[in-house]
Amino acid sequence: MTAHILPSRPRSSPRVKPKKQSRTREQPRKFAPLLLAFTANEAILFWSAQLEAEPNKIGAHNTFGVLLVQKHQTRAAIKQWETALELDPNDGNAQSNLAWVLATAPDASLRNGIRAVVLAERALKLAGGINPILHRTLAAAYAEVGRFDDAIATAERGYAFAQREGNRELADEFVAVLAQYRQHQPFRDASLELHED
């Protein structure tokens, strides 16, 4: 199973009328072609420099956090998402990414199920309640706090949305986590193993 850390807006979230964005809210998408040529280490250096020059870029904090997770620097990624949420408490991507880590990290010192539930519920609400990846995050958060009936119901809704979207890989992941939740076992994302400490 792969982590569903979101670098920008969730793939399947509904399109909403875009708000007029200030320069500090500019999304990092304009750099996407450039980033394809970067190694992970080069991309981390790039985003670090971007944030040093413009520390209020919320999308850059989110993208930098995603890159840090890929390098197993989960604590540093959490700091990036916390900063993004300080800048905009309603940033759904930072909420979702942080909730996923707080709910599923193998290292117990990183987990905070109660906060994960709050963040995941808010992120799902912001996305209109139909994003299957956010259902997966919320289900994992519910399981982390022992709310397995809610985890199962949420995962079943997410499975249905993934099926509707034709996302077979995500639907299969829901089947696997549903089996765990029915056995009252929370999900642990092995890709979040720490290599930094």
Image (tube, rainbow, N blue to C red):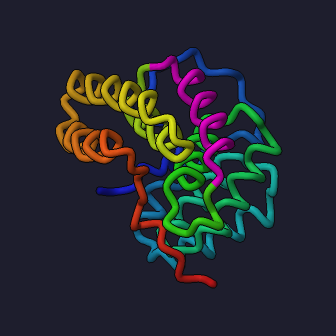
In this rendering, does residue 11 appear at all?
no
Number of marks in the rendered image: 0
The residue closer to the viewer here, 176 or 90, is 176
Viewport quadrant of the C terminus: bottom right
Please name the residue shown 31% across and 27% down the image.
156
Residue 152 image position (x, y, % from top left):
36, 31
Q: Is residue 4 visible?
A: yes
Identified at 25% across, 43% down, the residue is: 179
Point 49% across, 66% down: residue:
106
Magenta-drawn stretch contains 118: yes
Q: Does 28 lie within the magenta span?
A: no
The residue positioned 69% from the left and 69% from the top of the image is 48
Name the residue furthest front: 183
What percent of the width, then of the height, locates residue 160? 26, 23
The quadrant of the image that shows the N terminus is: bottom left
Magenta residues, dominant SS class: helix
Magenta segment, which residues? 112-129
Whole-percent x, y for residue 144 in the image: 52, 47
Is 160 left, or right, of 111 in this rendering? left
- The image shows residue 134, relative to residue 185, as above or below, that is above
Rendered position, 169 above or below 13: below
Q: Is residue 185 left or right of residue 27?
A: left
Q: Is 79 situated left or right of 188 in this image?
A: right
Q: Position of residue 60 (x, y in %)?
A: 65, 54
